[in-house]
Each structure stands twice: as structure tokens, then as C-alpha cells.
Image (tube, rainbow, N blue to C red):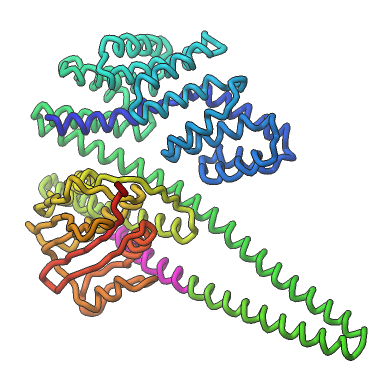
Amino acid sequence: MNNLKIILLFLIYPSIILCQNKTYIDKFELELKKKAIEYKSEINFNKAKAFYLNKNWDSTLVYSMKQLSTNHKTLADYCFFLRGISFRKKGLYNQAEKELTLVSNKFIFYPLVNFNFGLIAAKTNKYQKAINYYLKADSALINKNNTSQINKINMNIGNCYIHLKQYQKAEKYLFKNNNLLLSKGDSLSLFESYTNIANLYYEQYKDKEALIYFEKAYTLSKKIKDFEKKFLGSINMAVFEENRGNYKQAFVYRKESEQWKDSLNNQNKIWAVADYEKKYAIAQKQKQISVLEVENKLKETQRKTMFFSVLGMLLLLVGGMYAYAQKVKNAKIILSQKVKLDELNATKDQLFSIVSHDLRSSVNALKTSNTKLTNSLETKNYSQLDQLLQQNNSIANGAYSLLDNLLHWALLQTKQLYFSKDSVHLFSIVQQIEYNYKSLLLDKAITFENAVSKNSFIFVDLDSLKIVLRNLLDNAIKFSHQNGQISMYTVETNNDFCQLVIEDTGLGMSQNTINELLQDNELLAKKSNSEIIGTGLGMQLCKQMIKKNGGTLAIESEPNKGTKIILTFPKTAV
């Protein structure tokens, strides 16, 4: 029961405690646009504004800092606030607090500063401190009749009291917020309110009362267009029914939640691809500009050479030698750049060729499977229908993993992936990854063992570590036999590094395949001896991320005897 309860809280709280006051933010963004127009000559401020509105937090940080270096006092508070929000969005809460502290209390949107202090405190589990900041934000509001501003504060205060286990105070604020929302008919906010109240009762083991509000939230999610809320509504009902032992109904809710999750992922992928295409077009234009600049420099050198030739034979000789040396040097540079560019283009063409072939195969498989699915529905062949649905899910997961790896690979190549190293509890991360892949493990009846030492702490970037472990576990499952076994365990080698081993009893691979996988910038295809290798993009992504985290990768394997992946990461300094 405890495990199910932890999962439920994990799903609910991120969408509630970090609930922003959208009405107040809209006013801030409107004022920000006005300031940008008023100070249009401040290029860095205008760029910071544009990147902030596009949620490009890294670029916002860069240009807001450049603007601060100009010592423009009128825009200083806006820049500090933009930096505080950007650091908070990136999960760098200490830096966010430092920047927000620099905002003057005379800033017109200072209640929003206190509100963000509250969000940061809540995110770092300092709930009483968060409540104090929310109350400060409430007392500083200019327009007390603006219920949308008060609602968000009441909601966040109520959730903080839940964490503090002061349930009566939590109930007071949550129902105060709920009653205001009922009169307004705001479906999205009302969904969050019902979920909060359900969680309040669930925390107190009042399952009967909790179920009423979970069902209200689930019913309301049907009317909301937000895929994330639809997913939360159905997954909360699934976990609740599992906790009650009603596994049949829980399965129905969980299948529905997966559909909403797929819809949300598809929407995010479309936006990500569009953004990538835009950045690629800009990069191509910049390359063209660079080539033109090199050509202009060469022409300028030629004009200077002709000018000096008029001064005399001696100057002509010296000038000719200088021009010739410069020309040879520039030619070597251009030739070197051309060779590198050709190599990059060849890699890009090979990657796109392989990825497009795999995507076409996945789409074609989905098309064929959907035709069979339609026929099964018409003939009411429900056993085949369930098999086809599982097959479609497997194909979609494979295509999603390919696109996800492609996106992260592109970000690495363009140096846009942000790395923030911190101390990470390795056992907990492996436990999370195991939960994410539980359905795939169950489908193939694979036994998974998490034998990682609970005392292992490594100093790495958390997001990139998860990407590495997801790719390696996905490969282990893909190449494992039915009823196989996968285990993750640590090996103590020395005091500075921790060794994590991922071992399976699957197909294994030859030494030639291992050598090719460990080569840099190698993209692989299916070999003539029928070894199922794939594109190798996931492994290349893993290698680059392991290297950036100061780690190493080794592979031990034999055909039909399983595979052992050995990762080495630096330990957290004591």
C-alpha cells in the first residue's frame, strides 16, 4: 500500500504546488512587452524578453546578464526577475533565490517575486517558509477583488499544510479555494482543486471521501482539452483502484492514461521537431554568412596586394610573398573546414537515411496492424484485438525512443544540452527506471533485479544519467529472451569511482560488434549475419553523455551468452 501511495503523491503534487498565478503573469508579460518597446534601443533586453516568452531559459540568462552589465537601473529589476524565473524553471533553486533577492521591493510586480520564493521553498520541501512567502504575496496584492490571484495562493498554502500534516488548516484553505472556483466555473482550476482535496483525504486514509473527489476530478478531466490533466485524472483513478485491490477497473483506467500520455508526447514531439527545423535553418544561414565573410577577406587581401605593387619592385616582391603566404594559409583553413563539413554532412545523411528507414518501417507496421485491427473489430475477434493493441503499443514505443534519442543527439551536437552535476542516489534512480519499464518487463516475463548498493552516491547530471540508463535497459529488454533475467548492481573498485553493471541473459554479440559500438561517430545498420544492431544512435548518445559526466563505458559479451555493460562514474566527494 505504501508504494502505491508514494506513486499517487508523486503524480499529484508537481501539478499543484508549482501552480503559478497565470492572470498575474499575463499582466507581467504585457508590461514586459511595453518596456521592450519603450527601450527598443536596448538590444540585449529585447532579446532577453523574446527568449523568455519563448521559454528558452538558457538564452534568457545570457542576454539578461549582458543587459545588467550596462547598468541600466530602470530595467535592472526586470532582468533580475527574468533570471530568477529562468533558474527556477531549470531547477537551479539556489541561483534562482540569489537573483530574486536582488529585485528591489519597489518593483511593481514584487508580489510575484514573493510568490516565486514560495514556489522555490515548496519545491525544496521548506513548506512553512513557503507559506510565509505566499501570505506576503497575498498581503501585497494591489487588487484584492481579483479572485484568480487569491485562489492560487490559497491552493498552494493548502498543499503546503498537507505536507506539514496540518490537515485542518489545509482543509480550510483548499475548500475556501474550491468554493470560489465553483462560483466561477473554471474547469481547469476546479480539476486541480478536486485533486488537491482528494489527496488531502487520501493522506488521512479517508478513502471513501477521497474517492468522491478523485471521481469528480476524473469526470471533469473529460471536459478539459489539456492532455496532461486527462492523464493525471485517469492515472490517479488507476492507482486508487489498485490500492483497493480492484485490478480489473484499475487496468481500464491505466490503459486510458497511456492513451492520453501518448497524445501528450505526440504533441510535444511535433513542437520539438518544428523548433529543431527552425534552429537548423538559422544555422545554415549563419554558415553562408561565414563563407561570405571569408570571401570578402580574400578580396580585401588582393586589393591590398595590387596597391603595394605600385610602390616599386621591392615592395612588390615583399607584398607578393605576403599575399601568397596568406592565400595558402586561408586555402588550408577553407580546405580543412570543407573536409570537416563533408564528414558532418555524410554523418547527417547516413543518420537521416537510417532513421527515416526505421520510422517508415514503424509507420508501415502500424498501418498494417491497424488494418488487421479494423478487421478484428468487424469479426469481433477479441483475442486477436488485444494482441494487435499490444503490438501497436510496442511499435509506437520503439518509434518514440528513436525520436527521443534523435532529439537529444541533435542537442548534444549543437551544444544546447545543459549539464548540471549534483550528488545522485544511484539506487533510487535505478528504481525509477525499473518502474518506467515494468510493463515491457512483464510483457516478456523478464526478471529484473536491482542489486545496486543503497550507499552509492555519484556526482553526475541527473537528466543525462536517466537517458543513459533508459537506453541501456531498453536494449537489454529488446535483446533478451522470453523469461530472461536482467540485473543492475554496483562493484566497488576504489574510493573515487563507482562501477555500475547492467547484465542480461539475452542474445549477446560478437567482438566485432562490440568494437564497432565503442567506436566514436559510428552509426550502425543491420548486418548481413542477421545481428540486430539498429542505428547505434542510442549507444552513441550514451557514450557522449557518459563522457560529459566524467565516466567510462565497457562491454563484455559473447553470442547467445548475454551481455554485460560496465559503467564507471565519479563518486560524490565526502
Image position of 380 with respect to 398: above or below: above
Image coordinates for residue 515, horizontal then vertical, percent? 27, 76
Q: Quadrant of residue 428?
A: top left
Question: Does the image show residue 31?
Answer: yes
Count of labels in the image: 0
Residue drawn at the location 86% of the way across and 82% of the way down: 306
Residue drawn at the location 31% of the way across and 52% of the way down: 465
Left or right, residue 359 beside residue 27: left
- Residue 364 within the segment the image draws in magenta: yes
Question: Does the image show residue 156?
Answer: no
Q: In which quadrant will I find the N terminus?
A: top left
Residue drawn at the location 42% of the way across and 66% of the way down: 352
Left or right, residue 223 beside residue 481: right
Residue drawn at the location 25% of the way across and 13% of the way down: 167
Image coordinates for residue 300, horizontal then vertical, percent? 79, 73
Left or right, residue 310 beside residue 366: right
- Residue 46 within the segment the image draws in magenta: no
Image coordinates for residue 327, horizontal then vertical, percent? 71, 82
Closer to the camera, 389 or 150?
150
Q: Which residues are magenta?
A: 346-365
Image position of 110 with respect to 11: above or below: above
Closer to the camera, 328 or 260?
328
Q: Quadrant of residue 29?
A: top right
Image coordinates for residue 335, horizontal then vertical, percent? 60, 80
Q: Quadrant of residue 469?
A: bottom left
Left or right, residue 509 beside residue 549: left
Image position of 510 with respect to 317: above or below: above
Predominant SS along the magenta part: helix
